[in-house]
Amino acid sequence: MKAQVSLKTGKNTKAIAKALVDEAKTGLPKVKVKIWPAGEKLKIDLEAEDFTSLRAALNSFLGWAYCAEGVMNHE
């Protein structure tokens, strides 16, 4: 199972990507994650062994991206 996400994160894209890359490095069971900034968009590729793992990882990374963006916008 695969998912690709492109989030418009604006000028803080690199900082948000850096925060999420650290989460990806910790190693999620059954999931491979690739995260990178592309201009003002954050790209996330997820590949999981099953749908449940894909859904859980997607929910986590979207939540973390939302949180990181909120922190960056309140500085």
Image (spheres, rainbow, N blue to C red):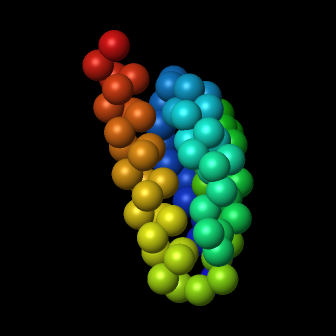
Classify residue 44 by image quadrant. bottom right
Q: In the figure, 73 relative to 35: above or below? A: above
Q: Nearer the viewer, residue 52 or 5?
A: 52
Left or right, 32 with respect to 7, comes to: right
Q: Quadrant of residue 72?
A: top left
Relative to 47, residue 51 above or below: below
- Does residue 74 lie above or below 52 as drawn? above
Quadrant into which the C terminus falls: top left
Q: Residue at x 35, y 26 (%)?
A: 71
Q: Position of residue 53 (x, y in %)?
A: 53, 77
Percent of width and height locating residue 56: 45, 70
Q: How many marks?
A: 0
Residue found 37% across the figure and 43% down from its top: 66
Note whether residue 35 is visible: no
Q: Quadrant of residue 41?
A: top right
Q: Residue furthest left?
A: 74
Residue at x 29% of width, y 19% of height: 74
Residue for point 51% across, 24% down? 11
Which residue is outermost to the top?
75
- Quadrant placement of the N terminus: bottom right
Given residues 13 and 61, the one toward you in this image is 61
In this image, 61 relative to 29: left or right? left
Q: Position of residue 20 (x, y in %)?
A: 56, 42
Residue 25 appears at what percent x and percent y? 68, 47
The residue lying furthest to the bottom in this view is 50
